[in-house]
Image (spheres, grey):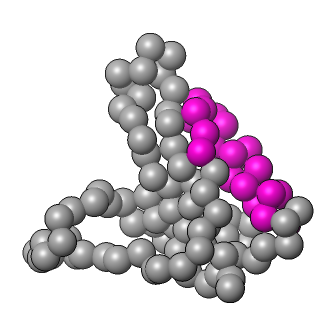
Amino acid sequence: SVYYDNPKKVAPEKHRISVGFTVPEGTTGTEGIRIMELPEGSYVVGSFTITPAQYESSWNEVFSFMGAEGLQPAPGPMYESYRNDPGKDPDGKHVVDICIRVQD
């Protein structure tokens, strides 16, 4: 999931989100489905094994780490990369990487 808006600054009903998956290079889009490339750069990546209720606190933890390290988010999208199928996890846990590009 790719997020374009800061939830602390933009009302929930105005959030812009894209959902996608990795495709082989050279794949072309179709009507209603587009190909998107995430921006290159340096990212802070927080890796978590969480329940759905822990997503917000996990994002907050990544932003807190960035603040403590003096890192600023770069303009543009942030994203979650899902590493498992929670339906197959015995505890229903989500394994997720939270990725935020930082300013150089």
Which image quarter: residue 19? bottom left
User: Taking the image as drawn, is residue 4 in sight?
Assistant: no
Residue that sits furthest to the top in the current view? 90
Could you tell me which quadrant the N terminus lies in?
A: bottom left
Residue 47 point in image, percent of width and height:
59, 45
Residue that sits furthest to the right in the current view? 68
Residue 91 point in image, percent of width and height:
51, 16
**The magenta segment:** 47-67
Residue at figure coordinates x 48%, y 22% from the top left: 92
Most foreground residue, 59 or 40:
40
Residue at figure coordinates x 46%, y 80% from the top left: 39
Which image quarter: residue 14? bottom right
Residue at figure coordinates x 49%, y 71% from the top left: 16
Most foreground residue, 40 or 55:
40
Membership of 45 in magenta stretch = no
Magenta region, main secondary structure? helix
Which image quarter: residue 57? top right
Residue at figure coordinates x 24%, y 75% from the top left: 35
